[in-house]
Image: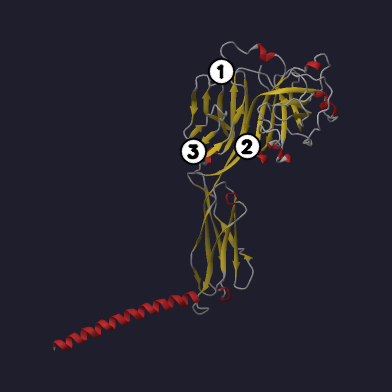
Amino acid sequence: MAAAVVKTATRPPFLLLLLLLGPARSGAPSSSSSSPPSSAAAARVGCWFVEEAGGGGSVMPSKLNQRRALLLLPPPGRRLDEAPLESELPAEVEPGMAFQVLDPSGTLWGGSDPSAAPLWLAEPDALSCEINAYSPQEAHVSWAAGLGGKEGCPRALERGKWFIVSLQNPEAGYGVSSILHEEEPLPWKQEAATSIVTTTTAVLSVFTRTPQLQSRLGQDVVLDCGFSAPAAPFSVEWRHQHRGAGRVILAYDGAAKRISVAEKGTELFLDPDSNNVSLCLRGLGVRHEGTYICTVYLPHLHAQQALELKAVEPPRVTLRPTALSVPPSGPAELACEISGYYPLGVSVSWRRRSPGSPHEAILDTWESGHRQSPDGTFSLTSYARLRAVQPQDHGASLSCSVAHAGLGDRELQKAVKLHVAGTSGPSWEDAVGLFVVAFALYGMLQLFFRRAAGDTAKTQKLE
């Protein structure tokens, strides 16, 4: 059977429940091997359970059904009794739509420390949670086909229900997808009716601490990806998707223990001890921008994480001319050359400031079209004109300010001072320059006359 395909759908607003349950109340007999865990708190997250609904006998689903669900996540290594959890469920959550997830590795929690808050709680408003049904299957890619051997899907995988949950919080810098297997009920609940809470165990979890990345061109970039799972052979696939096109850029065959696919400039961090399968891109270029999907394959199971990579490069700005001298009533024209930036969006503003006056905008401006360089970066030239310079404009500062995503909140500014010819005496800087020139000229004249006088004296002695 094929694994359920998670599709994007418009979700009605549903407030994520990020409350903490109180201490678990005693309601079951005590036993050294099967008693409920000690009192602990479970993080609660409002989710959507999404399933495909067929219609009209068509193979393709006619729509997606969405039901409200609740994820109950005890601290790593703990299991809570379902009875106290059931008594505190919201009324809108149907029976079976509350999922207690046992996470021994702490990957869903974001760490193995039960006293620390889950990583995804840092920015609760940006958190999304989705649960889908899942079916174990054999991998159909060559670098993972050999993981399950030739026996096919073990019958043990056919027992119990399987689910996949995805917790994504780009603002908190964490995303995780986990394949869940339904647990057997506790011993004292074997004869009880079906529980309202479905208790599951995370079998395979794939996570990233860099769901959104931004980097300058030319730098090396590490796309973080790791997983937790029982000890078993595994394969890894990295896929790049951009503007409707996708391809595998790196693949590791765990059965053959070799790299099957590797584009130039890609490296895999393969660390068996930490299950780190991050990807390194050497010398980031515009072509590297897009979505990267990290997929980890186990025998008959696979899960993945998607990461968004954006390239950015701030502009270089040059103002011409570097010195501006204009006759009275003459026009003044300036060119602001902006080059080497990415992405495309850039804004330019021109201002003038006369001595003793506030800044004012220069309105007579125009721009060339964007030009793209072979490396993918862009450039343009912005122009400004003062039609009739007046004597009172002497000493005014004319500036070009550029805003771009690569500059963050600041602007890059270049300025030049306007000199109106014949409107005033030399400035202090000019006076200093004239003094230096005059002093040097005086010294040269002194040296010349001394040499001339010496030559005259020698001539007189010879006579």
Residue drawn at (45%, 76%), measured in percent from left and top? 432
Q: Position of residue 234 (x, y in %)?
A: 56, 22
Name the side, left or right, on which 93 lies relative to 216: right
Of callouts 1 and 2, which one flags the residue occurring earlier in the amino acid sequence?
1
The image quadrant of residue 398 is: bottom right
Name the side, left or right, on which 276 lies relative to 199: left
Disc number at residue 211? 2
Q: Using a 10 Å C-alpha cutoff, classify the residue at mark 2 as few (fewer than 14 neighbours), some (14 to 19) or many (20 or more).
A: many
Picture quarter with the N terminus:
top right
Q: Which residue is mark 1?
A: 147
> Could you tell me if residue 63 is visible in this image?
no
Question: Which residue is at the front of the view, 274 or 60?
Answer: 274
Q: Secondary structure at mark 2?
A: loop
Disc 2 residue type (three-letter): Pro
Mark 1 in CB contact with mark 2 (< 8 angstroms): no
Total label count? 3
Question: Which residue is at the front of the view, 32 or 12?
Answer: 32
Relative to 302, does residue 46 appear above or below in the rendering?
Answer: below
Disc 1 residue type (three-letter): Leu
